[in-house]
Amino acid sequence: MFFDFVIDIQQFTTLTNDAERLLFRIGALCYEDSRSVGAIAGVAVAIIFTWKLLGSSNGHQRRQPKRQTPAASSSTYNVGLNSSEPLISSGVCSSSGDLRAHNVVDEFFQPVKPTLGQIVRQKLSDGRKVTCRLLGIILEENSPEDLQKQATVRSSVLEVLLEITKYCDLYVMETVLDDESEKRVLLALEDAGVFTSDGLVKDKVLFCSMENGRASFVRQLEPDWHIDSNHDIISQLARFIKYQLHVAPIKHERAASNVYCSPSLEQFFGNI
């Protein structure tokens, strides 16, 4: 760049000397014939030419300092490098902010765990009427003979039972051998808090003296679901009832496509 600047100075000096010689010659011509119109025109052209020549040379010289020297270029590079640091950190902050926003969105759209009531309605396919056996499902006892001694409501089934009564018209039934067994069953249900304003109604606790009597109750009530622990009763009712749940500790072969199996009522609804 310094070498170019020296060449420009030399060119400017040469142009200036040429302009001076031209002016000198024109002046001499004017001296010889000052009254000549051509001389006067020549003087004017020479002045204009010299002014333009000097103006372009000065403009070229004024623009020369704008050329960046190596030192200036290095300084500019350093400044640019330093100025990029806030941009980089800003990008990091922006990435962190995007990550936090992404996490918030993920948390917001995470699947909400359904409530037991929602599960009950989904499992029962919005069935409105349900019939259910007591022994082995709601009660701890497994036979009519056991009811002659005691009746105990299974604590693990209470929550599910109450949810069913909220959304369905529930009837429970059992085979008993005497009136005392009926009283024990009703007392056990009452002590467990099943008989509430939103719960089971005493009039919907049915008793019979034979297993076939329970099947007759179910057919007369025509429920959407029947829940039983007796495989024979399930098989008999398979073609009359829309859905059935066979509750048994040992898995049996399904009596029909509309019959479901589960070790317990609460496990069927996922409330273990």
Image (cartoon, rainbow, N blue to C red):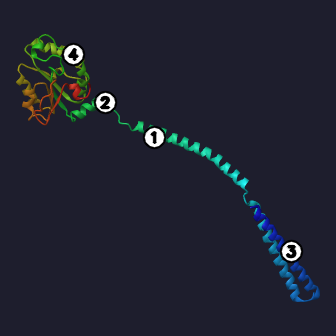
To which residue does mark 4 refer? Answer: 190
Task: Give the Cα separation between the discs numbered 2 and 4.
Answer: 26 Å
What secondary structure is marked by label 2?
Answer: loop
Q: Gap in Å between the C-alphas at discs 4 and 3?
A: 127 Å
Position in image of residue 228 (x %, y %)? 13, 26
Q: Are marks 2 and 1 in contact (CB under 8 Å)?
A: no
Q: Dots 2 and 4: beta carbons under 8 Å?
A: no
Q: Residues within 10 Å of mark 2 (few under 14, many from 20)?
A: few
Front tag of 4 and 3: 3
Quarter of the view holding residue 44: bottom right
Q: Do the residues under discs 3 and 2 have CB atoms within 8 angstroms?
A: no
The amino acid marked with disc number 2 is Thr
* Mark 4 Cα shell of 10 Å, populated few (<14), some (14-19), many (≥20): some
Q: Which residue is mark 2?
A: 115
Q: Which residue is mark 3?
A: 17
Amino acid type shown at disc 3:
Asn
Q: Please tell me whether mark 1 sits on a helix, a strand or a loop.
A: helix
Judging depth in this view, the residue of 81 and 209 nearest the camera is: 81
The residue where tag 1 is placed is 102
| Location of residue 204 in the rendering, given as x and y in whole percent from the top left corner | 16, 23
* Number of dots carrying numbers: 4
**Of the residues tagged 1 and 4, which is closer to the observer?**
1
